[in-house]
Image (tube, helix red, strand yellow):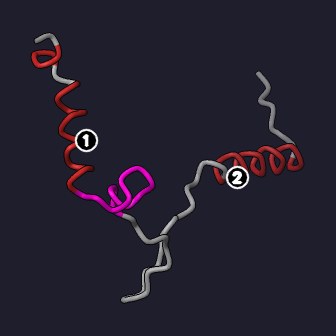
Amino acid sequence: MSTRILNPRALAVLAGAAVLGLSACSEVPQVTVYEQGQYRGKTDTRPWEGDGFKGDRAAWEKALKERSRGQNEYNRIQ
């Protein structure tokens, strides 16, 4: 029996393909650096400060309660 050995060029191509294939599987770290006291994001608004309620928190809470009441099957069928 004769054993067949890959020539050095084919071995280099195969090793290069393996290295490229394995490097595509690595994960890039996605770390955000926060500085104390400096928030650069969008400021959050409260739900009742939009156009629908115009700053009326009581109206927003009432609408929220009515919505949750409408989603309760027991209350809906009565």
Q: Which residues are magenta?
A: 46-57
The answer to which image quadrant residue 51 occupies is bottom left
Residue at the image position 52 percent from the left and 65 percent from the top:
29
The answer to which image quadrant residue 46 occupies is bottom left
Q: Nearer the viewer, residue 14 or 8?
A: 14
Q: Nearer the viewer, residue 21 or 52?
A: 52
Give me the disc on residue 37: none
Of helix, strand and loop, which one carries label 2?
A: helix
Query: Spatial distance from mark 1 to mark 2, Cα to Cα?
Result: 59 Å
Residue at the image position 39 percent from the left and 65 percent from the top:
45
Say if 41 sits above or below 53 in the image: below
| Left or right of residue 52: residue 23 | right
Residue at the image position 73 percent from the left and 51 percent from the top:
20
Name the residue that disc number 2 marks.
19
Q: Is residue 54 magenta?
A: yes
Name the residue that disc number 1 marks.
63
Say if 41 sits above or below 22 in the image: below
